Image (spheres, rainbow, N blue to C red):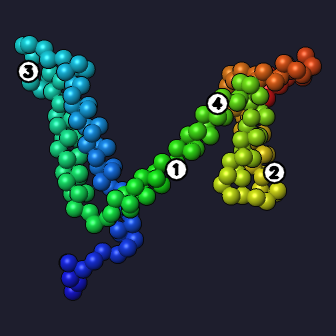
């Protein structure tokens, strides 16, 4: 029989680090949404309660606030230090790096072109992920070429040609703009 007051394993404690920050943000969003219900929904006179446009959103937001508050209060009893909580938050924020990579890709494509941008970013992301062998990066390049050909040729996705294509000879520029 185990003692219920026994300390939890370190992996369980590590998994819960950062929960108070998540709970606080969740509670703040729930309260913010609740304050906006009057401007986003209507209350119509003469309509039954359950048929009111504001009724079910209000029920949902009330539940969201209640459970967020319960989660926040439960998280306050966590044995983690603030340093542990914010170390977890720092780990969460690291995922935004890939959103920035995507935004950079979206910014580069109209300037350089779809094919060159895809090849550059596939190689850069492979290097960022820690892959260093020439063979692996070449395979990623082949996958990048396949992606471009599938999207532009077979699926006929309309992606504008890059400004860099303007410096190519006419026939090559037309081919690159239409198919690559």
Kindly state the secondary structure of the residue where label 3 is placed: loop
Apparent side of residue 161 relative to residue 14 in the rendered image (left or right): right
Q: Residue at the spot x=78%, y=46% of the render?
A: 141
> Which label sits on residue 106?
4
Splitting the image into 4 quarters, where does residue 62 fall?
top left
CA distance separating discs 4 and 1: 20 Å
CA distance separating discs 1 and 2: 27 Å
Apparent side of residue 14 relative to residue 101 in the rendered image (left or right): left
CA distance separating discs 2 and 3: 65 Å
Residue 154 in view of the camera: no
User: Which residue has dot 1 on it?
Assistant: 94
Q: Residue at the spot x=81%, y=51% of the render?
A: 138
State whether residue 177 is above or below residue 12: above
Marks 4 and 3 close (CB-CB < 8 Å)? no
Splitting the image into 4 quarters, where does residue 172 fall?
top right
Quadrant for the C terminus in the image = top right
Marks 1 and 3 close (CB-CB < 8 Å)? no
Q: Position of residue 21 (x, y in %)?
A: 33, 51
Kindly state the secondary structure of the residue where label 1 is placed: loop
CA distance separating discs 4 and 3: 49 Å
> Which label sits on residue 138?
2
Q: Position of residue 42 (x, y in %)?
A: 18, 17
Kindly state the secondary structure of the residue where label 2 is placed: helix
User: Which residue has dot 3 on it?
Assistant: 48
Q: Position of residue 70 (x, y in %)?
A: 18, 51
């Amino acid at each position: 029989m185990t003692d219920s007051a026994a300390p939890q394993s370190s992996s369980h404690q590590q998994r819960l680090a950062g929960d108070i920050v998540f709970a606080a943000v969740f509670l703040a969003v729930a309260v913010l949404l609740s304050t906006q219900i009057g401007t986003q929904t209507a209350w119509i006179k003469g309509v039954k309660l359950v048929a009111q446009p504001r009724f079910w959103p209000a029920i949902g937001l009330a539940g969201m606030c209640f459970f967020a508050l319960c989660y926040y209060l439960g998280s306050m009893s966590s044995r983690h230090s603030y340093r542990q909580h914010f170390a977890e938050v720092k780990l969460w924020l690291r995922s935004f790096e890939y959103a920035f990579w995507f935004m950079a890709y979206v910014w580069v494509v109209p300037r350089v072109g779809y094919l060159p941008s895809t090849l550059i970013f596939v190689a850069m992301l492979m290097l960022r992920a820690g892959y260093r062998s020439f063979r692996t990066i070449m395979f990623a390049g082949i996958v990048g070429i396949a992606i471009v050909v599938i999207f532009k040729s077979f699926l006929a996705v309309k992606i504008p040609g890059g400004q860099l294509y303007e410096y190519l000879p006419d026939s090559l520029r037309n081919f690159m703009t239409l198919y690559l």
